[in-house]
Amino acid sequence: MTEAVWQLRQERTGGLSETIVEHAHRGELTRQSARCPQCHRQLPARPVVARTVETMVGPVQVKRPYFYCPSGCGGVDPLDQVLDLAPGRKQLDVQQAAAQVATEMPHEEAHTLCSELTGVQLGSKRLHTFVHQAAEDLSVLEVAPSRQEIAQRLEEMAAGCFRRPVLVLGIDGAYVPTRPDSARQRQEGQRHCRSRRASWHGQWRDANGFRFYLIDDERIVHVLSWHQVQNEEQLGDALQQVKEAGVIPADQVRLCVVCDGASWIWKQVESLFPSARQVLDYYHCKEYLHKVAKVQ
């Protein structure tokens, strides 16, 4: 019985949402004219256009008047603005739920679990797009744990120890292939036809990041990480924000920086954390020694 109700829930709640929209926004549904937001021309209503959107409470169909500006400004949908509808089919509540699940597990598992729990079918590519949109304008301080959370992790690591815990800062970078935003847009042509070679050209860009973590003989405790497609100046700005905000209590830890031999990394370290213990990581140390031995 509960399984049958679960299967019908979105159809029923979606219909209920349609009824609420009809009663709450009757004026917008019967609107006869609208003003163009660009040229401010008065536009008459055209025939009603139906649009179906997917929400957490099920699919909701909205039948609203459509307005088109003959001056070339495009179409206007006043009800979409009143309801704050997202451009795509999946609405903001679905996007928010999907992004929250994706931050806790890999995307391959997140889209399956999200579909099972919500009843909204969601692919892994669409889920990745939602997460990208949500994180696009975030800064390092907005994703960093609170001072209370970091202080609690420090207290747990320092319990029973005579000296301050060791906090390791790791910095690294790599080249990653990227594609332009135009590659995500819909392409003209017939469906179900043989795909052609992409007309856009990708670009290799710098992906740099850093991670703070506590370490002792038995444990590694994550504190803060920030990895983005960014250059060395942007990474330095992020580290500067972390330092100035006092997110990392420098007086309560022994800071150790473990990195490779790239000069731009150590330039940032010496500028921001001059008193930190500097360590060349073991893998790159072996790599350099091997090159020297090969030359000899």
Image: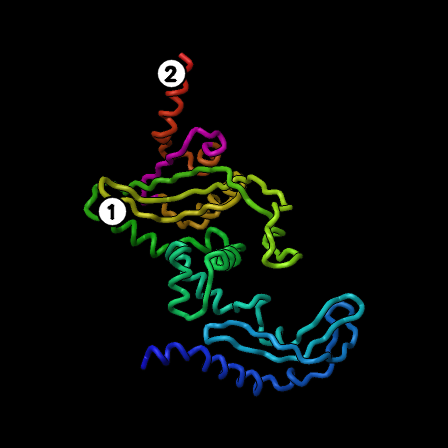
Picture coordinates of residue 247 (x, y %)?
A: 40, 50
Q: Secondary structure at mark 1?
A: helix
Q: Nearer the viewer, residue 122 or 280?
A: 122
Q: Nearer the viewer, residue 20 or 119?
A: 119
The kind of residue on which mark 2 rests is: Ala
43 shown above or below 147: below
Residue 146 visible in rendering: no
Q: Nearer the viewer, residue 67 or 247?
A: 67
Question: Looking at this rendering, what residue extends furthest in the right direction?
Answer: 71
Q: Residue at x 66, y 76 (%)?
A: 78
Picture coordinates of residue 175 (x, y %)?
A: 51, 38
Q: CA distance from mark 1 to mark 2?
A: 42 Å
Q: Is residue 263 left or right of residue 185?
A: left
In the rendered image, which quarter contains the C terminus?
top left
Picture coordinates of residue 206 (x, y %)?
A: 53, 39
Asked whether residue 253 is drawn in magenta, I would say yes
Q: Which of the 4 image quadrants contains residue 161?
A: top left
Start-end of magenta stretch: 251-266
Neighbour class for label 2 at 10 Å: few (<14), some, many (≥20)? few
Residue 56 numbered tag? none
In the rendered image, which quarter contains the N terminus?
bottom left
Residue 25 visible in rendering: yes
Q: Is residue 63 left or right of residue 16?
A: right
Give the residue at mark 2. 293
Neighbour class for label 1 at 10 Å: few (<14), some, many (≥20)? some
Residue 158 numbered tag? 1
The kind of residue on which mark 1 rests is: Ala
Picture coordinates of residue 236 (x, y %)?
A: 50, 41
Q: Residue at x 44, y 77 (%)?
A: 10
